[in-house]
């Protein structure tokens, strides 16, 4: 019956169309006589079929208007990075931005941050259970986890990874986070960790990528660092190694990753991700403009590439909990003089750095805790000002006389000479040049020491072999400044770069990290900031945002604030270029 009605509807449509075409040629009397020729039942059929046709059209339009294409499997993206990968290995990756990026894509973690910076389970079944004394954490893995080679991921892998980090022979930059922690296996899916003292920020250490014990066990510390597994890792993240392309001299040109079918959150939508590597920023930008790569992520340093929106690029501007500062080595006889540090502080124009170096895509920073973080003290901003006249007066009263011959200040035959070290990242170089110009107005001789990131880390930061250091520190999701400013952290692998030592600060920071009472922590951190402002072991400059450019066809990215640039891959499983 329905089929007959549909055929009638079709025939009606055809005849109605033909009739409408003739309608303008008919006279009024012809039209009336035509309708009079129809029998009553024919007119009823015509009206019914017309109504049915009208309803069908409305339903079709309504259905199409409410239909939306969802993400589909397939497609690939290509991203450019500066430098060479060396350790795609969570034990070492934090020392290199490239290694961190690749490790984040190929290794899953016990816990991870969501887009609101809340800790949520990744490999873990739930957040750890914490004992009443806050010293014991018990974490349980999800069942049926697999490595990318199909073997099971178990508690033995977690214990193995942490033990490697704790062993000083492996020289992991994460060792300080796990140095006073006992780790033990309870069963195949459960691990218990016991701390010697309470640490309010310890929970963030669970954002740790886990190594497969069956791949790495048996290697010596030296063999561990030299293993091919550092470039061909077996992980548990959403993507795994598919292909490595090298030049004849062994330089890695690109890494192509493939979707991991064993990924515990389900196969990612993208089929492949390719990372291409370039010698410097100029080559990277040229590759982006030449469409050799479509994804490019950097703090902005070139207005045309990173600040202006374009049709060929979707731009994400993402907040980072990171500040850049000049750290003074307080063992240096010139910088140990507080008058010198005060004068340099008074002549440092942060706004000029923000405007000229970061094109305005940065924020002025005045202390070791950022605006919006627990314990931020607004007094550090209101007390900060610039005055060349005041700075010169402080130096004069401090015995730093200006030599009219050299135009350099001298005290006790020692010139006011400062070596400012930083890496060769263009933003840092430009910032150092601005500081050089500002400080020389005081009568200081400033020598810039520009080296590679690796050389800066190995030859200057770790041995504390610098006078002044321009460097960025990431405070993480919890602003606990203990690792950065407690006197016990003044030697590597601690992060107290200035060698700052203050008994009151040590007490404030220790008390704050041994309680989960946010009011106590906030009060201690506010007082701590005022002491740092008075002592000036560093000059805090700015906190930058991270700018990430992607092709418009790439969807599924949902980022506002990330802990580290590598966290831009937080939701990479959900990225897609194809639709159903």
Image (cartoon, rainbow, N blue to C red):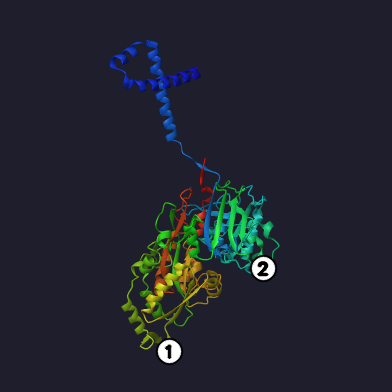
- Mark 2 to mark 1 CA distance (whole Å): 48 Å
Dividing the picture into quadrants, the one containing residue 369 is bottom left
According to the picture, the residue beneath numbered tag 2 turns out to be: 222
Identify the residue at image location x=32%, y=16%: 31
Observer-nearest residue: 283 or 125? 283
Q: Label 1: how many residues lie within 10 Å, few (<14), some (14-19) or many (20+)?
A: few
Instruction: Say which element carries label 2.
Output: helix
Q: Which mark is residue 324?
A: none
Report which residue position mark 1 lands on: 413
Sequence order check, earlier mark of 2 and 1: 2
Vertically, is 336 above or below 52?
below
Disc 1 is placed on an element classified as loop
- Residue at image x 40%, y 81%? 444
Compare residues 206 and 455 and report the one nearer the observer: 455
Q: Which residue lies most toward the left here?
A: 28
Instruction: Compare residues 253 and 320 and report the one nearer the observer.
Output: 253
Quadrant of residue 41 within the rendered picture: top left
Location of residue 350 with respect to 245 vertically, above or below:
below
Q: Position of residue 387 (x, y in %)?
A: 32, 75
In front here: 290 or 315?
290
Q: Position of residue 280 (x, y in %)?
A: 51, 66
Q: Position of residue 154 (x, y in %)?
A: 65, 53
Q: Is residue 206 visible?
A: no
Left or right of residue 553: residue 220: right
Q: Farthest residue in the right direction?
A: 218
């Amino acid at each position: 019956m329905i089929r007959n009605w549909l055929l009638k509807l079709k025939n009606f449509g055809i005849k109605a169309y033909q009739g409408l075409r003739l309608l303008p040629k008919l006279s009024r009397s012809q039209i009336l006589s035509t309708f009079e020729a129809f029998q009553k039942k024919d007119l009823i059929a015509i009206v019914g079929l017309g109504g049915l046709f009208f309803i069908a059209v409305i339903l079709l339009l309504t259905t199409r208007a409410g239909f939306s294409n969802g993400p589909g499997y397939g497609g690939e993206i290509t991203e450019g990075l500066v430098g060479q990968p060396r350790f795609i290995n969570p034990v070492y990756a934090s020392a290199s931005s490239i290694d961190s990026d690749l490790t984040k894509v190929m290794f899953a973690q016990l816990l991870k941050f969501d887009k609101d910076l809340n800790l949520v389970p990744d490999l873990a079944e739930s957040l750890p259970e914490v004992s009443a004394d806050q010293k014991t954490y018990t974490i349980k893995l999800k069942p049926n986890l697999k490595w990318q080679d199909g073997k099971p991921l178990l508690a033995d892998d977690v214990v193995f990874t942490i033990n490697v980090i704790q062993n000083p022979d492996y020289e992991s930059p994460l060792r300080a986070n796990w140095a006073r922690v006992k780790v033990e296996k309870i069963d195949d899916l459960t691990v218990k960790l016991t701390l010697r003292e309470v640490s309010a920020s310890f929970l963030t250490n669970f954002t740790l990528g886990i190594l497969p014990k069956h791949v790495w066990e048996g290697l010596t510390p030296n063999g561990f660092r030299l293993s091919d597994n550092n470039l061909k890792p077996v992980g548990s993240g959403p993507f795994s190694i598919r292909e490595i392309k090298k030049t004849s001299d062994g330089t890695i040109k690109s890494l192509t990753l493939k979707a991991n079918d064993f990924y515990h959150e389900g196969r990612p939508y993208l089929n492949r991700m390719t990372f291409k590597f370039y010698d410097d920023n100029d080559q990277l930008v040229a590759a982006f403009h030449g469409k050799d790569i479509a994804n490019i992520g950097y703090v902005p340093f070139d207005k045309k590439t990173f600040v202006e929106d374009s049709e060929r690029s979707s731009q994400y501007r993402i907040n980072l909990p990171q500040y850049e500062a000049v750290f003074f080595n307080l063992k240096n006889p010139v910088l140990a003089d507080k008058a010198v540090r005060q004068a340099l502080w008074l002549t440092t124009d942060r706004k000029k750095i923000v405007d000229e170096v970061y094109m305005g895509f940065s924020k002025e920073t005045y202390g070791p805790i950022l605006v919006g973080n627990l314990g931020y003290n607004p007094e550090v901003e209101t007390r900060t000002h610039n005055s060349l006249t005041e700075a010169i007066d402080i130096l004069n009263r401090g015995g730093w006389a200006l030599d009219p011959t050299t135009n350099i200040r001298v005290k006790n035959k020692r010139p006011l000479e400062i070596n400012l070290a930083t890496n060769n990242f263009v933003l840092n170089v430009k910032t150092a040049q601005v500081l050089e110009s500002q400080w020389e107005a005081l009568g200081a001789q400033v020598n810039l020491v520009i080296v590679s990131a690796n050389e800066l880390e190995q030859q200057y930061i770790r041995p504390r072999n610098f006078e002044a250091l321009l460097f960025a520190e990431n405070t993480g999701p919890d602003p606990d400044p203990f690792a950065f400013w407690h006197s016990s952290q003044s030697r590597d692998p601690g992060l107290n770069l200035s060698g700052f030592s203050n008994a009151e600060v040590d007490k404030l920071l220790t008390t704050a990290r041994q309680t989960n009472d946010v009011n106590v922590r906030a009060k201690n951190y506010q007082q701590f900031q005022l002491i740092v402002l008075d002592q000036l072991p560093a000059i805090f400059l700015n906190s930058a945002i991270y700018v990430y450019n992607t092709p418009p066809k790439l969807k599924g990215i949902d980022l506002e604030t990330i802990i580290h640039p590598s966290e831009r891959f937080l939701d990479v499983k959900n990225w897609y270029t194809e639709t159903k």
